[in-house]
Image (tube, rainbow, N blue to C red):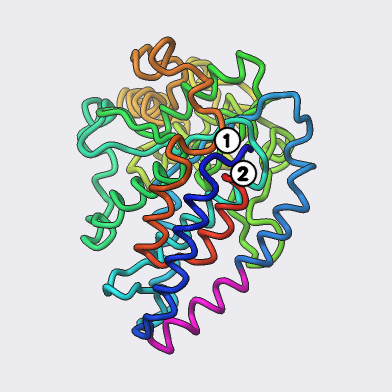
Amino acid sequence: LRAPSAPRVQSLNHQRHHQRRAKATTTTTNRRAMTAVASSIDGRADAASTSATSIARDADEPHLILVDGLSFVFRAYYGWNARGSGEGLTNAAGEDTSVLYSYAHTICSLLELKPTHLAVCMDAKGKTFRHEMFVEYKANRPPTPEPLLELIPKVEQLVRDMGVPLLRLSGVEADDIIGTVSRRASDAGFRVSICSPDKDFYQLLGPKTKMLKPSKSSKGDPFDPFTVDDFRAMHNNVIEPEQFIDFLALVGDSADNIPGVEGVGPKTALALLEQYGDIESALANAANVKGKRARESLLSEKGAASAALSRRLVEIRQNLTVPSLNEPLLPLDSLRVRPPADGGAAATRAFERYELDTAFERWRRLALS
């Protein structure tokens, strides 16, 4: 990437260097936490750079990475909380910067994979069309902690300041934004990587679409590719990704309060889909199902209705006709990775405010050089 306005960024960085030396307010605990996490981040950054060529195989083929934005906010927030009190990061103003630190490094790790296009997709506040179908949708989840709610706008602004497009649409979940934009991109010849730990995205896997799951290891690559072949192996080569919609609809999903069909667990669901292919055929042949509980549920009006409702709830929409997710309002080229229009000034101010030194240096190397 070309580096516009480099002198401005360098002068700001020179100024902030002297400001930082003048500050002696960071606690010893905070410094220790920053050092430990930065060491881990640096090791993973080296690994990410090493594997970038294998993940971004063909520089001439456009590659779009779509980030399930909130999942990484929650992941960082609860990950830092699990460390215990006093282990987080704060700036001189007393603001908790732990999540911002982790999120900035996540974006940098993705940039190191050298995608041609990148966007972060976020959920909007309020109800969605799924709540209209099922008022109990996600009703079992505890309220989001207030400190976490206060962090989300800061994360979103930092993403924008770093020059990464952020997509959000009222009444629509980030999953459906990802589904629609990924389908548009794959149809246009892009390779697509969906960055998320969420199994719901298995249904979108295809020849040109894979997932990037956060690595469970603190060393090595920060993301583990998950492909169609990985999905097939996980499910004993019984079902294809597009059948995962029916699989989830049958077994339900407690995380989203999806009811599923009573008496149908993962093994039964795989057996049904292996024999009948989809929910409709399974319902049509319910009388022949071997397991008594599953057979009775599928034969019942309640079971059939629950299966149909659950399928509508778990299916990620891939063809939303909302103007803001389609041409001409959202050309795919608008998601192209490029230096920020302001030459990095807004990002520099944000990194200065939150005192994210290592993230700033890493981002500047990637975005402005």
| Amino acid, disc 1 | Ile
Q: Secondary structure at mark 2?
A: strand
Quarter where residue 225 is shown: top right
Q: Give residue 151's position: percent from left, percent from top.
A: 29, 57
Residue visible at 35% across and 18% down? 324
Q: Nearer the viewer, residue 177 or 50?
A: 50
- Label 2, residues with CA under 10 Å away: few <14, some 14-19, many ≥20: many
Q: Nearer the viewer, residue 42 or 174?
A: 42
Dot 1 alpha-carbon crowd within 10 angstroms: few under 14, some 14 to 19, many 20 or more: many
186 left or right of 150 in image:
right
Numbered label attached to residue 332: none
User: Which mark is first along the chain, 2 or 1?
Assistant: 1
Question: Which residue lies at the image location 63% right of the left edge and 67% below the top edge?
Answer: 218
- The three-letter code of the residue at mark 2 reads Leu
Q: Please check the rendered image and state whether residue 132 is part of the magenta-colored stretch, yes or no.
A: no
Query: Which residue occupies 48% across, 58% down?
Result: 11
**Image: magenta residue range:** 27-40
Seen at 47% across and 20% down, the residue is 318
Q: Which residue is mark 1?
A: 65
Characterize the magenta stretch by its predominant secondary structure. Answer: helix
Q: Label 1, label 2: how many angstroms apart (C-alpha)?
A: 9 Å
Are dots 1 and 2 in contact, CB under 8 Å? yes
Q: Position of residue 189 (x, y in %)?
A: 66, 16
- Residue at mark 2: 212
The answer to whether any part of residue 240 appears in the image is no
Judged left or right of residue 12, residue 230 is: right
Q: Position of residue 26 (x, y in %)?
A: 38, 82
Residue 66, percent across and down? 52, 35
**Up-down relation of residue 182 to residue 231 (above or below):** above
